[in-house]
Amino acid sequence: DAEITQSPRHKITETGRQVTLACHQTWNHNNMFWYRQDLGHGLRLIHYSYGVQDTNKGEVSDGYSVSRSNTEDLPLTLESAASSQTSVYFCASSDYGRDTQYFGPGTRLTVL
Amino acid sequence: GQNIDQPTEMTATEGAIVQINCTYQTSGFNGLFWYQQHAGEAPTFLSYNVLDGLEEKGRFSSFLSRSKGYSYLLLKELQMKDSASYLCAVSLASGAGSYQLTFGKGTKLSVIP
């Protein structure tokens, strides 16, 4: 079955370290998205991609970067982790011309 | 900018009916989604409205009024497993057949016996 996976599911890191969260989908979806979810804020868009080599900044992109080298993967990198980036991170994907997004299981990141 | 409002928390009794409201002010509106999210899990798609009116899917129904910027999710015959957060999201066209979702903060529904 086609699916969307994220790894790791849990991560603890230290302030200042570089961290990469993986997102992989097998639906062959054109569009991929990264969100963070925090109490009191709901889901907020970090970065998104509408195809290979395309990346765009979302509402809360500072301190994060993404790259899209193939259809299946959109890794999210925290260049220098900060305690304010402690959160649950969700990856999502949608097909071209469709707005329904399907979410991965999430990664809980703790920055100490 | 986008503004999406929904109640923070609601409590309802098993077997009852509950209505969760969502109001929005956006530009470039394409449609409105409802997602369900159980604690510690990912959001899952529940319903999508693009035209005015009521969409029914089993125990769940969703209503949209585009002119009023208003939607609601109606849950009938509540079950304990319906205890979850319900996320209202607006779909915005961003060109070239692509769309973004902007989410409200979610409504945490607790179903009590």
Image (cartoon, helix red, strand yellow):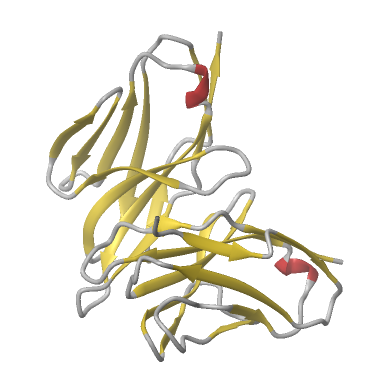
The residue drawn where x is 27% and y is 74% is B94
Q: Position of residue A108 (x, y in %)?
A: 69, 58
The residue drawn where x is 23% and y is 60% is B29
The residue drawn where x is 76% and y is 83% is A18
Is the C terminus of chain A in the top left, top right, bottom left or bottom right quadrant? bottom right
Q: Position of residue A39 (x, y in %)?
A: 64, 49
Q: Is residue B26 visible?
A: no
Q: Where is residue B84 in the image (x, y as percent from the top left)?
A: 52, 32
State the residue lying farthest toward the front: A1
Is the N terminus of chain A in the top left, top right, bottom left or bottom right quadrant? bottom left
In this orientation, which residue lies closer to the viewer: A62 or A73? A73
Quadrant in the picture for residue B17 = top left
In this orientation, which residue lies closer to the viewer: B2 or B35? B35
Q: Position of residue B49 (x, y in %)?
A: 21, 45
The image shows residue A111, relative to residue A75, as above or below, that is above
In this orientation, which residue lies closer to the viewer: A20 or B49? A20
Quadrant in the picture for residue A100 = bottom left
Q: In this view, does B64 lie to the left or right of A72?
A: left
The image shows residue A56, relative to residue B59, as above or below, that is below
Q: Can residue B108 be seen in this view?
A: yes
In this orientation, which residue lies closer to the viewer: A38 or B4? A38
